[in-house]
Amino acid sequence: HRLRMKGPPGEDEVLIYHRDYRSLGDALGYEIRPKYTVVRYMFEGSGTLHAELLQQLAAVDEVWVPSYFHKQVLWSNGIDQQKVHVVPEATHVKLIQQQLRLVPPFDDPEVRGFVFLSIFKLEDRKGWRELCHAYCLAFSAADD
């Protein structure tokens, strides 16, 4: 957001980047580079990662990942171990507990209907639209 609103970072700034790696090249392509660049990145799967991603991660000062699993995958793909740091996802436990009190229990005999539960972040890469579409094709209001 900052890059779109204000243009390139200044040479005395720290850039913390949290977006898909395919747009990271734009941030790294400025003539004036920030003093320090941090990329927060997560991915599904293991094995060999995309060459463009690896090239870009090699060009930044730090890489933040949400788990030790992600750290190991980056290490196995040749990313410098000193620059990869685990910064876990944050969870607001009290807020979740408050919200759960509002949800009827799944085993309540008074509750009718089908309960569809899927837990993931609602972003395009997770395929939530496809999941909802498939659900609507497979089930109707008459299904219980």
Image (cartoon, helix red, strand yellow):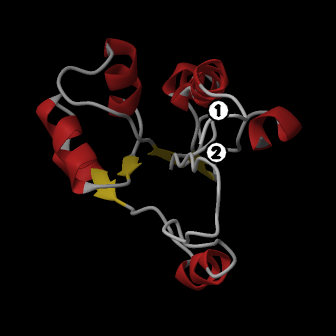
Is 130 left or right of 71, judged from the image as shown? right
Secondary structure category for the residue under label 2: loop
Q: In the image, is residue 100 above or below residue 42?
A: below
Question: In front here: 80 or 1?
Answer: 1
Q: Quadrant of residue 11?
A: top right
Q: Quadrant of residue 4?
A: top right
User: Residue farthest to the left?
Assistant: 76
Q: Residues within 10 Å of mark 1 (few under 14, many from 20)?
A: few
Question: Which image quadrant: the C terminus?
Answer: top right
Q: What amino acid does circle 2 point to?
A: Glu
User: Residue farthest to the right?
Assistant: 5
Residue 39 is situated, as x and y percent measured from the top left of the image, at 47, 43
Question: In front here: 116 or 128?
Answer: 116
Q: What amino acid does circle 1 point to?
A: Ile
Q: In the image, is residue 48 above or below residue 115?
A: above
User: Residue farthest to the top?
Assistant: 51
Secondary structure category for the residue under label 1: loop
Q: Residues within 10 Å of mark 2 (few under 14, many from 20)?
A: few
Q: In the image, is residue 99 above or below residue 137?
A: below
Q: Which residue is mark 2?
A: 11
Q: CA distance from mark 2 to mark 1?
A: 6 Å
Q: Which residue is mark 1?
A: 32
- In the image, what residue occupies the spot 21% across and 48% down? 69
- In the image, what residue occupies the spot 32% across and 59% down? 86
Residue 99 is situated, as x and y percent measured from the top left of the image, at 66, 76
- In the image, what residue occupies the spot 20% across and 20% down? 48
Question: In front here: 63 or 48?
Answer: 48
Q: In the image, is residue 92 above or below residue 18?
A: below
- In the image, what residue occupies the spot 60% across and 31% down? 128
Verify CB contact (< 8 Å) between mark 2 and mark 1: yes
